[in-house]
Amino acid sequence: MDGVNLTADGFSSPYTVAFELKKDGTFTRTTNDDGEIEIETGTWDFNSGVGDVKKKELLILTTLTDTYDGDTETYSGSDAPIETLVLDELRSKKMVVTIDGSYNDGTGVETTTGSFTFEQ
């Protein structure tokens, strides 16, 4: 992934992510994967720093709504998906995030690695 195109299994398609973190602790993330739009909203927080993990090294996202292909899923409590992003760089107008994880959707495991750079 180079921020403009997502390449997987030899196939490349346009891919963009827009991220808005608001001071009130809410976020909106809009993903455009070759014209398919997903909009996620929810809450965010930094980790407090425990053990070897430094304070503000992790960004924790709790998704409360997820709209994809016109259908909206609403989550609350323990049903809300939680995502933890590793912050490689955090400045007032720039955030670099490393992604290294896997997801099991019941039909198989998908592994994602890479990084995103978000600039204001």
Image: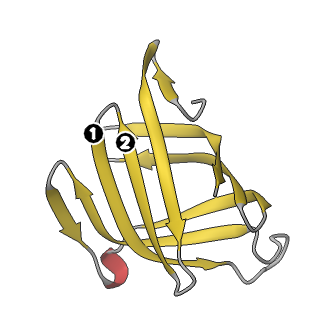
Q: Nearer the viewer, residue 8 or 105?
A: 8
Farthest residue to the left: give it.
71
Identity of the residue drawn at 52% across and 87% down: 24
**Image mark for residue 103:** none
Q: Which residue is the site of mark 2?
A: 32
Residue 2, position in %: x, y?
Answer: 60, 30
Choose top left, top right, bottom left or bottom right for residue 114. Answer: top right
Residue 95, position in %: x, y?
Answer: 70, 58
Left of 39 or right of it: where is 84?
right
Q: What type is the residue that disc 2 sits on? A: Asn
Q: Quadrant of the C terminus?
A: bottom right
For the residue labelled by badge 2, is the local secondary structure a helix, a strand or a loop? strand
**Image mark for residue 36:** 1
Residue 41, position in %: x, y?
Answer: 37, 70
Residue 33, position in %: x, y?
Answer: 36, 36
For the residue labelled by badge 1, is the local secondary structure a helix, a strand or a loop? strand
- In whole angstroms, how far apart are the C-alphas of marks 2 and 1? 6 Å
Whether residue 92 is visible? yes
Q: Nearer the viewer, residue 63 or 39?
A: 39
Compared to 33, does 82 lie above or below?
below
Compared to 11, does 15 lie above or below?
below
Left of 69 or right of it: where is 118?
right
Q: Nearer the viewer, residue 3 or 97?
A: 3
